[in-house]
Structures are given as C-alpha cells and as structure tokens.
Amino acid sequence: LERACDLGLPALALTDTDTTAGWIDLLRAAEALAAGGSPVRPLLGAELSDPHAEGRLVALVAEEPGLASLNRLVSEQRLGFDPGAQGAGEGRGPEDFDLVRAAVRHQEGLLYLVDHPRLCLGLMGRVPAEQVLVAISPASVRADHGRGSERVRQGEARNTHLAGDPTRRGASPGDPRR
C-alpha cells in the first residue's frame, strides 16, 4: 500500500489465491496509511483457481453484498459446496466444484476478471456483461483436443465455433452454405 501511495494510485486490490485471509492485514494497513494522511482505497478480492480446468477468475468486491458473495464463493471452491446452502455438503467434496456455476450463483456485488475463453463463454449470458472483464493472452490459450497440451501457434485459428465457418462468409440467410 505504501508503494501504491508513492505512485499516486487511488486504490489497490489484494487477491490472494483461493482465500480471503489477507483482507484483515490489508484493511489495517490502509487504515494506518489513511490516519497518516496518505489514503489508498483497499479493494478486496480473491483469485479463484479451477482444480479441474484451465483458467482463473479474479473476483473483486464491487458493492457491499459482494463481501458475503465472495466468502461463499471461496468457501465453495475450498469445500466443493456452499456451507450456507440448504443441504450443504451432502455427499459433496472439492472434486465437485465447478468454477463457472459457482461464479454464476455467487455473482451479487462482484466484478469478475477472467483469463480464459472457457470462463468467458461460461459466464456469457449468465452474468451481466458489465460485471465481467476479459483479458486473454495468447499464452493462456492452449489447443487440447486429445493431442496433449500444445501451444497454439500464432495465426492458427482459435475458437472457430465462434467465428463461424470461413467458407460460409457472405452467405445469405436462405443460402444452404449458411
């Protein structure tokens, strides 16, 4: 936080991986800086990994309900279920966790940053667009269709199911090529 203050940053996010344990220290440090006349607004969040698939989701608290939402989301990631839900934990464990479904369930008051097309596509239409920011680097995208995990070469087609079949470009709605 002191470095953020030195750089003139108005806010700084803390996003521990799969936990919210650092929040107390961040809030105390921000309070001490503010008392000394150097306020930096602390942004609370967590980086959630998916133990079953590629991609990470950073969840930031945007509004007060987001505090509870993020704590439930982190608990579900660690346990495989939301301990506050009715019938929680009945025969469920961490192996049952699905990051996209959990993010959709616990979206209230949160802003999501995602780094993988799988997460972006999974959240599309299920979480308001203004709550999801996407930053996908070529290094985070891998082609893995039963051939192992090969890096996608620059210029190689990716997500062709989204772009459509290039042989159908210019086809009219009634055209059988469409």
Image (tube, rainbow, N blue to C red):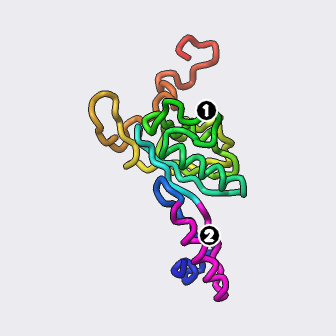
Q: Are circles 2 and 1 on residues that touch, CB within 8 Å?
A: no
Residue 66: percent from left, percent from top:
67, 53
Kind of residue at badge 2 = Pro
In the rendered structure, which segment of residues is drawn in magenta? Answer: 21-44
Disc on res. 42: 2
Category of crowding for the residue at label 2, using alpha-carbon neighbours closer than 10 angstroms: few (below 14), some (14–19), many (at least 20): some
Q: Nearer the viewer, residue 121 or 167?
A: 121
Extreme bottom residue here? 36
* Disc 1 packing (10 Å; few <14; some 14–19; many ≥20): few
Residue indicated by mark 1: 87
**Spot occupied by residue 53 in the image (x, y as percentages of width and height):** 41, 38
Sequence-wise, the earlier of marks 2 and 1 is 2
Residue type highlighted by circle 1: Gly
Q: Secondary structure at mark 2?
A: strand
Question: Which residue is found at the position 27% from the left and 30% from the top?
Answer: 147
In this rendering, would 148 be left or right of 117?
Answer: left
The N terminus: image quadrant: bottom right
Q: Residue at x 54, y 49 (%)?
A: 74
Please, is residue 43 above or below residue 93 in the view? below
Question: Residue 120 is drawn in which quadrant?
Answer: top right
Mark 2 or 1: the one toward you: 1
Residue at x 47%, y 22% (from the top left corner): 167
Distance in Å between CA atoms under marks 2 and 1 = 35 Å
